[in-house]
Image: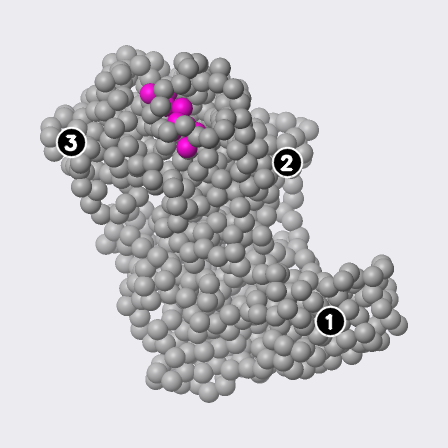
Amino acid sequence: MRRRGFLRAGGVAVAGLAGALAPAGVARTPDDSFVRLRRRWRELAAGSGYDPAAEPYRTALAALGRAAARHRAAMAPTPARLWPDQPFPSLSGTPRRLRAMATAYALPGTGLTGDPALGEAVAAGIDHYRRHVYAVGADPAGNWWPWQIGVPKALLDAAVLVGPHLGDGRARRLAGAVDHFVPERRLGSYSGTSTAANRVDLCLVTLLRAMLDADHGRADLAVAALSPVFRHVGEGDGFYRDGSFIQHAHVPYQGGYGVTLLSGLATLFALLRGSPWEVTHPLVFEAVERSFAPFVRDGACMDLVRGRGVGRRPFGDHERGHEIAAAILLLGEVAPAADRARWHALVKGWETRNEHRPLLEHAEPATRARLAAVMTDPSVPAAPEPVGHRLLPMSARAVHRRPGWCVALSMASYRIAHYEHGNGENPRGWHTGSGMLYWWADGHGDQYSDSFWPTVDPYRLPGTTVSARRLSDGAGGAWGEACPPWRWVGGATDGTYAAVGQHLSGLESTMEAFKSWFFLDDAVVCLGAGITGRDGARVETIVDNRRTAAPLATGEGWAHLEGHGGYLVPGQALRTLREHRAGGGAGGDVARDATHDATRGVARDYVTLWLDHGPDPTAAGYLYVLLPGATREATLARAADPAWLRVLANTADGQAVHVPALGVTAASFWTAGAAGGLTASAPCAVLAREHGDGTATLTVSDPRCDLDELAVTWDRPIAGPAGGPPGRDVLVTGSTVTFRGLSGAEGASVAVALRLA
């Protein structure tokens, strides 16, 4: 056995890298490390702890076996194809079929488990594909990803699963092809397309490649190259300290590349446990609850962190939620016991509340077995849906949870794109970063799941302020290039309530607006100011665009959508529309794309509510209040009680509100100034909250990330800090609180507890 060494990866020891890394391909003293790895890979694919002859495993495994038998029978190799319906290069279809056949070979209960003829068919198919498509010297035409990640990962996975059937010669030739398309230098510089999720995938490909011919050097390289992933970043791709995860430099992506990264690392950690290359890292464990869980509601991953993938398939948000849950369960096998216990409760809660696409009914056998063990364990509680606010300023995202409902906000900034499109996907997602406000209430967990994106009006996404100027598909540039210039995007939160703002520019338009949201206990107060435009187009603020046929009732200053919630629109003319929409939505004309077969010809009912600011507005504004889950009676009662909310300011200089019953005063200061008893020395967000016991909390943030010091004066008799000195970075002088050292806060909220005189 090779002796163990350690590589410092982000401050955590990674076992198995003794001294300097050996070059790939260098011979080592023979040991059984790779025999164990190959066996462990097959164990991870098959899973454990279930009876393959019992339902629901029996039916699923038998179906897998029948599909593999059909694929084997249909194989008709020619230089132009392996299957008649998969002409080369077939960069996804052929490798996936080979992997599916290999899975049927490796898993129990398929009727083809260990079948020599199937194993040989997979091995012959891999080699045929290698000779005619994935050959040394072939031109990797088109997108780089299939050649360096998609194809080799599928082929290598299949090769390891069928084991000896590949033989030394075919294994050596496959290794050579992978080395050609994925050379060692791809794991050199941490830049370009070798970052974050892509880096993890490239490391997994390199490790599987090493497993083909027991290449210790490449295994060393695969693990060592993970180390940059285990660091917080301040720009570009990766995890941020506030929990944000970014890929493609400007796109929040927990529900796409992020889950690919989490799943890849969980697989690597589980595979390498007990080997000379064993590796884990606390940043990954931390990310489960800081980066991923905030964006999963009842088993579905929210679309505001799914990038261009939102319109691929109906219920794609549930598919991504399933993948996150599966990755968490696998990661739990190598995590500390306390983390594992919390994660099991978290996943059990998601599955218990999932009314639409339960994971137990859609998972592969290995994941289903892990989840079944958790669901049937009486010692594991089902964690309830949390209550509170999470603000992630580095990705311009916010999630607000209250009993019975949840709201999520998607914004754009100088660092975060309006939207992402690419590979023909999401060409009309133009306005998803213009303050789109998603919300779910009890009974409506599928609001954005069931063909929302291919059918919604892309110019009228809920919560947004937009120019009606017509845009071309893919306007603004591909892969998240469309970033507005403004830095003031973010807010302040005390973990319960929040003040969030966005200085907004329209995509390829002259429209500009200042938008604020104040997240409260049973409402979201929405303010807009300084709304201007100069290109002849109308500008609208979309109060909501609900996928429903429910009855809508309206009155003076209010509206109520039966079974959904209420709206307050004091002193404004609310426009409404009920329509049956088919195709051509934010996901584009789905009928053009074969990947959208499930949405061809689909249509859905919508109720749209909006405020019309007219063409070329000058300093227009709005006020409306969203009451998620409210009954008609509760909506009418709130509309009849104007004293519950005081709007202190709503201009391009600042927006502020006071809610007496909550003791909350909150503001977005677009410039230095004053509003309703709060005065700020510089642009900032402020949340002041009196607790009713003689204490208060003052929370601030610097969304522009420009300040080192900020002074906030509050017209309350402040006796001093509560609970002792507030720390060297906060100075309390009379009614003025000065916050210092904000330059390293990255837009995060900073709070001080105060005693009131």
Residue 620 pos. (x, y %): 50, 84
Instruction: Report the Cα–Cα distance between label 2 and label 3.
Output: 47 Å
Identify the residue at image location x=22%, y=47%. 142
- Amino acid type at image mark 3: His
Q: Earlier in the sequence, mark 1 or mark 2?
A: 2
Q: Residue at x 65, y 41 (%)?
A: 383
User: Depth-wise, is mark 2 or mark 3 nearer the camera?
Assistant: 3
Task: Tell me the tag on residue 574.
Answer: none
Q: Give yes or no for residue 604 being in the magenta stretch.
A: no
Q: Residues within 10 Å of mark 1 (few under 14, many from 20)?
A: some
Residue in the picture at 59% in, 63% down: 747
- Image quadrant containing the C terminus: bottom right
Asked if the stretch drawn in magenta spans residue 215, the answer is yes
- Report whether residue 288 is seen: no
Q: Which residue is mark 2?
A: 339
Residue type, label 1:
Thr
Residue density around tag 3, few if under 14, some if 14–19, many if 20 or more, within 10 Å: some
Q: Name the element at disc 3.
A: helix
Which residue corresponds to mark 1?
738
Residue type, label 2: Asp
Disc 3: which residue: 132
Q: Residue at the location (73% across, 71% down)?
A: 738
Looking at the image, residue 2 lies above or below residue 353: above
Write down the region rendered in magenta: 213-221
- Residue 117 as seen in the image, left or right of residue 731: left
Relative to 538, is 733 on the left or the right?
right
Q: Secondary structure at mark 1?
A: strand
Check disc 2 and report its element: helix, strand or loop: helix
Location of residue 113 in the rendering, given as x and y in whole percent from the top left corner: 35, 15
Give whichever of discs 2 and 3 has the lower sequence position. 3
On the image, the x and y values in percent for residue 536 come to 34, 84
When asked about the image quadrant of residue 53, the answer is: top left
